[in-house]
Image (cartoon, grey):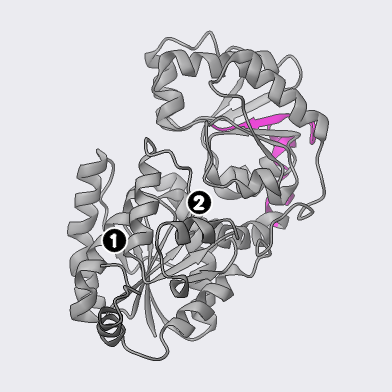
Amino acid sequence: MKILVVAGARPNFMKVAPILSALERAGHERVFVHTGQHYDATMSDAFFRDLRLPEPDFHLGVGSGSHARQTARIMEGFEPVLLESKPQWVVVVGDVNSTIACALVASKMRHEHDCRIAHVEAGLRSNDWAMPEEVNRVLTDRLSDLLLTPSHDARPNLLREGIDERRIVFVGNVMIDSLLRMLPHAKALQMPERLGATPGAYAVATLHRPSNVDDAAQLEVILGAFAELTKRLPVLLPLHPRTRERIGAFGLDSVADGIRLMEPLGYSEMLGLQSEAALVVTDSGGMQEESTVLGIPCLTLRETTERPVTVTEGTNRMAPWPLTRDGILGAAESALAGGRVPVGARAPEGWDGKAGERIVAALEEGSKGESLSLRLLLGLVRGQFPIAP
């Protein structure tokens, strides 16, 4: 089979690396497309090196912009790639603009070129339509032929939305494949020591969501809580460029006094730092998952999460909403009191380092039998829609 795999932003790299590797081991022809949705030469080079990613076959170089402009640029750039490569499958991951843009292009060409769409991380729902990622998730699932779920709570979400159960396959969390493979190397970097921190005696924080950093009052509350938390233990905060810019624009530098503000870290460096932390405080979806596998208490600064399994089975907890300084501090203290657990002790089923292999197996199985056009015809005859229109 020829399988095209799309990555657009840094969180995608950890997800596509195991898929590309599993495709190569299985002997399939792979086409790797990097849309360039998020592109920083230093950061991207580090991720590609750490994850042993191949050079992209196509780099669209779309860059940043508004959601509409960025999505349109990706669609414009991806259409000729699809026409040239003619894959049997287009695999999109996660919930970024590249995910929905490439799925939309492929969906409009699927009937003519018999090209199918597989969505990795299908079925995750925050039920918060103010999040652009929620829009991307729901629409991509609607367009996809094969919905590859990372946790068992995703399947009921899809069934409630009328998705045919035959299109849903549980494969587990592919990002954990990268984590487990890279963890020994990441620990060997001794990041806490390099940064002057004591292993097991500091907090790692990340902050980047517009709902948290684009509102001056909200950002002040969060930074104030972090600053207060430094009286209990050091808080290391690698700064997303957006967050750094907002802190300066809102005049909140003094509020952040005492917090260890740092430049962004590469994947291995961040994993090494996170793996030795006493606490993770974040608004990132990926770090909720990573901390659960690492066995580290995590406090999520969001009203909802599309990864509730990290709360019900993992080490994650949600901060009281709306956010207040006391609410964040109280939840952080409770999380710290719970302590760490061994790596993998709270990992949900399928978060075992083998999701990439299961994804390839699902693609192989999905390619058997009737052609796409025949399945569409049969679905129409039966009054069903096994493939989303």
Residue 158, above or below 298:
below
Name the spot of residue 73 as percent of width and height, x first.
Answer: 20, 51
Considering every residue shown, the one lying at the far front of the view is: 383
Residue 200, above or below 98:
above
**Which residue bears the numbered disc 1?**
102
Name the spot of residue 186 as percent of width and height, x first.
Answer: 68, 51
Kindly identify the residue that appears in the image at 40 percent across and 50 percent down.
Answer: 9
Q: Within the magenta stretch, is there residue 81?
A: no
Quarter of the figure with residue 81: bottom left
Residue 18, above or below 341:
below
Tag shown at residue 30 = none
Residue 68 located left or right of residue 283:
left
Disc 2 secondary structure class: helix
Please rate how many residues cluster around mark 1, counting C-alpha atoms within 10 Å: few if below 14, some from 14 to 19, many from 20: many
**Which residue bears the numbered disc 2?**
46
- For the residue marked with disc 2, what is the amino acid? Ala
Q: From the viewer's side, name the closer residue of 348 and 84.
A: 348
Residue 269 visible in the snapshot = no
Kindly identify the residue that appears in the image at 27 percent across and 87 percent down.
Answer: 374
| Span colored in magenta | 185-206
